[in-house]
Amino acid sequence: MSLKVIDRAPEVRCYQCGSTDIRSVCHHCARPICAQHGSVAVRERATSLSAGPDATGAPGGLGASGGPGSPSALADLDTRPTSREFAGLKLLPVQAAVHHCEDHDHTVGLLSAGVTVASGILRRRQTPADELPPLPVFPDVNTASVVERLTGEVQLTDAGYVSTPQPVEGKIVIGMTHARARWQETMGRYRKRYQLAEDYPVKFAAGVAMLRGKAGLAFGAGQDAILPDGLGVEFRGDVDGHDLFDAKRGRPQGEWELSVRYKLQSARAPQDIPLWIVPSLGATSGKRVLMIDLHWNMPEVDGSRAELNQFELIEFQVPHQWGNLQDASPPGAASSPPTPGQPRIIRWRQHRPAADDRLRRRSGSATAPRSMTLSMQFEKPILDQPRLSGSLRATFNRTLSGVTGLDFYLPGGGPVRHLDVKPRTEISVRFDISLSTLRYQERRAVPDESRATGEDKFRSRSDEFIGVMPDYHTVIELTNAISADGYYVKTVVEDHPNHDSRDKTFKRGWDISGRWYQGVFPINFIISLRGTEPEDSVAGSALGRTVAQVAVDGTFPNAEMEQKIEDKWDGLHARVTGLLAARAVHIGDPGPSVTHGLVSNSPPGIGVPRESPSARLSAPGPGESSDRIVVPGEVVDRRDGAVPSDQAELQRQRRDLRLLFGESGVIGERTCREAITDVKAELRYLEQPDELLSGPLGRLAEAEVADLLRQRKGLRRQLIAGQLPEDFYSDEVADIRAQLKRLGWSQWS
C-alpha cells in the first residue's frame, strides 16, 4: 500500500465543534469560538454581543445608534461584564467583556484573586509583568491589505513555449493609529489598579485579526505576531518604545503598521504562469503588423476563479529597425522616441479589457474576459529582426491561497467587524520572444464570396429543409450531434421570435457558435438556423421550414492548414445538412440536385440573414439587437437510460489516459488525475444520475448538465488523440467545471 500526503488548506473553525461561524476568540489563547461554545461574557445581554453582525456590518448591533447594542445601551448595569479582568479601567461594556475557551474559563477567578492579593495586600511587592493581564487598547484600524505576488519569465524559442514561475510571495499589512489622550487615560487607570510605578514595563493587547476563507499559507519563521495555528495575527507588545504609543514631535497619535509575509502551500502553488503570450502576424498587412494574443486563466480555488482587474503595465521592447509605430490597438499606447542603436519601447498603462457583453450568464451580467489582442503596425517588415522582449503586470481580484478577507476581534476576544479588505493577486512576467519560426498567416473563411467562382463554387451558402421546425428540439439534436463529434459548442443564442398573425406562424432564428482545435490553431464555426414554425401544432410539421447556413473561419500559415479549414467546413456542413434532412418532409422527387427534401440556394420569405455567418464569428458590432437570449445547448431526458456505447467509451478513455501519462508522459499528472476523476464521475452518473446532483432539476437544467458532460467527453477525446494541447484542454474543461457546479453537480463535494 502506498501513502500520499495531500495538503488541505485550513480554515478558522470553532476549537470544539469545527463550525466556521465564529463569534469570538479566547482572550488568553486566541482560540476561535462559535456562539454555542463561548463563555458568558456579559450578564443578561450576552446574546446581544454574540448575535453576529447587524445590518450595518457592526458586530452585535454596535452600529445601531440607541439600539440594544449601542454604547449607551451597553453602559446599563444589566450589561456588566462577568469577568473582572478589565475592571477599574472604565471601559465600555463591549470593550470590557472578556471571552474564554473552556480551558481558560476556570482560571479567571483565580487570576483576578491573585492580582488583587498581589496589588492590594502585598503592595510593596509588585506582580511580575508576565502575570498581569495586558493593557487593553482600542486603536483605529485604518488600512488592511492582502496581496500575493507571482513573478516569472516566459520564453518562446525554436524549442517551444517555456513558462518559469517563481514561488508566490504573500503579504498581509494592517495599519492602525491610536490617539495619545485615549491610551494615556487608560494607562493611568491600569497603573493605579495594579499599583505600578511610572517606569514599570507594561505589555499591551490591541486585538486579533483572523483569516477568512480556506487559507493555504505557510508563514516563515521569526514572525512573532503569527498565531500558533497560522490562521491569524495578534497585536501585542511592550508599550515602551512601540510605534503605536509614539506621539512625539507634535503628532497627536501613534501609528503602527504590522506586516507579515508568507508563501503558499505546495498544493496551491501554481506550476505554470497562468498568463500566455501568443504572437502572430496580421493577415494581409505586408508583414508589418504584429498581433499579440494575451490569454489568462487563473486556477480555481475553492470553487471560484480570480478575474482580471486590469493590466497595470504592458511593455514591449522592439528593434528600432522596425521603424515608427504607425498604429496600435487598443488605443492609448505610448511609443518612446527613436534612439539610434536602442530598442523602441511601446507601453500601455492601466488597461482594462472590456467584458464580453454578448456572452451573458444567467444572472444577466457580462462574462469576464479571459483574453485580449494587441495590434501594432510598424513602418517596415518585422521579420527582418525577429525578436522582441518586454514585461507585463496584471492584478486579479482574488488570491491564489484562498484568503478572502480578515476579521478583527477586540483585546477581550469580542468581535468588531470585517475589515475592509480586497485581497488581490499581482502577476509580473518578463518575456523574451523569438519570431524566427513565426510564419505569415492569412485568414480563410468558408464559404468565401470572393471565391464563389473558384474553390468555393460548389459550397452552398444556405440549404432549406421543408418540414423541419426551427425549434429547440432541432437545436438540441444538432448540438448533441456535433458535440459528440468533438466540436466545442460555446454559445447557443436565440433571436426573439416574431409572430406573423396573418400566416399564423412564428419566425425563429438560432446561432450556434463554437470551436474546433487543430493543434494550437482554433477553427471557429457558426451554424445559423432561420425559419418558420406554425403557431398551432395541429397544422403539422409540413408548414415548418428551416434554412441552415454553415460557416467556418480560421488562420493558416501554410497550404496544409488552409486545406484543413476547408475540410472542416465540408465535414461540418455534411453533418448539419444530413441531420436536418433526416427530419425533413419528403415531397415527391426533388430532382438530382436536391437530396432529402427541398433544398434551394436562396429561399424567399424565410428571413435569410443579410450578413453571412462568417462575418458574425467576430464580436458583434454596435446596434446589434439586445433581444438575443442565451439558452441551454441541449434538452434531453437523462432518464432515458444509459447507452452501453457511452460506458464503453468512458472506460476506454480512462485506460488511454493512464497510458498517456504512465507510459509516454504526453500529459501531466494533474491533468491525467483530474480527467480520470471526471470519467469516474460520468460513469457513476450513467448508473445513478441522482447521486451526483444536489437535488431535483428541471428539464432544461438536466439537459444543460448532459450537454456539458458530452462536451467534456469530446474534449478528452481530442486530448487523447493529440488534436488538442493540454493547456487549451485545461482551460476549456475549467469553464465546464464551473458551469456544472452552478447547476448543482456534486462531483467535488
Image: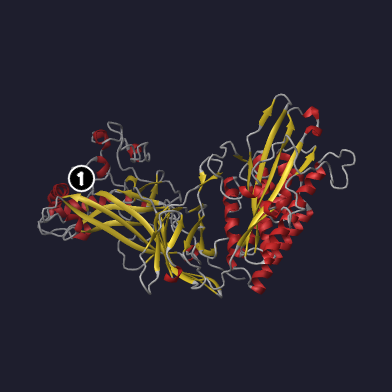
Q: Quadrant of residue 44?
A: top left
Q: Visible in this render: residue 638? A: no
Residue 667, above or below 216: below
- SS at badge 1: loop
Q: Visible in this render: residue 157? A: yes
In the image, is 410 to the left or to the right of 1?
Answer: left
Q: Quadrant of residue 701?
A: top right
Q: Position of residue 683 (x, y in %)?
A: 70, 55
Q: Position of residue 252 (x, y in %)?
A: 14, 50
Q: Which residue is labeled 1 in the image? A: 87
In the image, is 701 to the left or to the right of 37?
Answer: right
Q: Nearer the viewer, residue 721 or 686?
A: 721
Q: Nearer the viewer, residue 419 or 630?
A: 630
In the image, is 656 to the left or to the right of 377?
Answer: right
Counting other residues with Cα less than 10 Å from the Cα at mark 1, is it few (<14), some (14-19), or many (20 or more)? some
Q: Nearer the viewer, residue 577 or 414?
A: 577
Q: Nearer the viewer, residue 519 or 144?
A: 519
Q: Amino acid at mark 1?
A: Ala
In the image, is 90 to the left or to the right of 475?
Answer: left
Q: Tell which residue pokes out farthest to the right in this image.
A: 589
